[in-house]
Image (cartoon, rainbow, N blue to C red):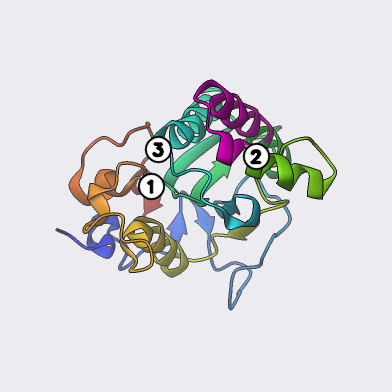
Amino acid sequence: MANLAQVLRLRHYGNIKGIELFRKAKAMSPVNPSFDPENLYFITTTSVNRSHLFTPDKHKQIIADSLVYMRQKGWFNLYAFVIMPNHIHLIVKFFSPYNLSNVMRDFKKYTSKQIVRNCRAENLRELLSYIESAGEAGAKSQYKVWEEGYDVREVFSISFLEQKLDYIHHNPCQPHWGLVEKPDDYLWSSACFYMEDRPTIIDIDDLRELLVP
């Protein structure tokens, strides 16, 4: 299996599709930076209290279907993803007028409603009771599936991009998760696309098409 540096041919690249990644001479990526439609972003968002609300495959599918919808509607390009039992990671590029905050707001609102609906349909009483109690504590809605806010970091260098892509794909293999032995065995990520050149469970955009010598 090729490592990610080999897969992405990163050794001598300094640009992403003409974007000067080092133009701001940053030592590290800013947390929650100002939105810029020209940039790539690494996004993390978690379930309420980091509870394992996305363990059922149906709930992971709801999240995946929402990502598919937004990508197909031209809200963003989706370059990498992983859907874990209590959080997700994404690498995306947004398109105006669909800015980061609006997309994340709508994504969370829609997936929350669908997950609540599925809990009712499948009589998942324990999960439904938990997200109801979380909603009561938050006092903003009857049910709460996601934590408020999200972590977003601008992709500011090739090394940062490689690091986060590697982190996304190896997340399911971490000892505290132990979901699979190999990254490309995990159904709910983009690992198989980059590591084995196989289709993922949802269509994504190829990072390699952005990289220029």
Which one is nearer the viewer's eye here, 124 or 7?
Answer: 124
Residue at which label 2 appears: 129
Q: Position of residue 66 (x, y in %)?
A: 53, 29
Magenta stretch: helix, strand or loop mostly: helix
Asked whether 111 falls inside the magenta stretch, the response is yes
The location of residue 122, given as percent across then percent down, is: 49, 25
Reply above or below: 115 against 187: above
Mark before the other along the chain sequence, 2 or 3: 2
For image coordinates 75% across by 43% down, the residue present is 135
Q: Using residue 183 as the reference point, say whether residue 196 is left or right of it.
A: left
The residue at which mark 1 appears reads as: 207
Q: Nearer the viewer, residue 68 or 93?
A: 68
Residue 51 visible at all: yes
Amino acid carrying mark 3 in the image: Asp
Q: Residue placed at 65% from the left, 67% from the top?
A: 30
Circle 2: element type: helix
Chain part drawn in magenta: 109-128
Residue 145 in sight here: no
Q: Amino acid at mark 2?
A: Ser
Q: Residues within 10 Å of mark 2 (few under 14, many from 20)?
A: few
Kindly identify which residue carries mark 3.
205
Query: Label 2 to label 3, Cα distance in Å?
Result: 37 Å
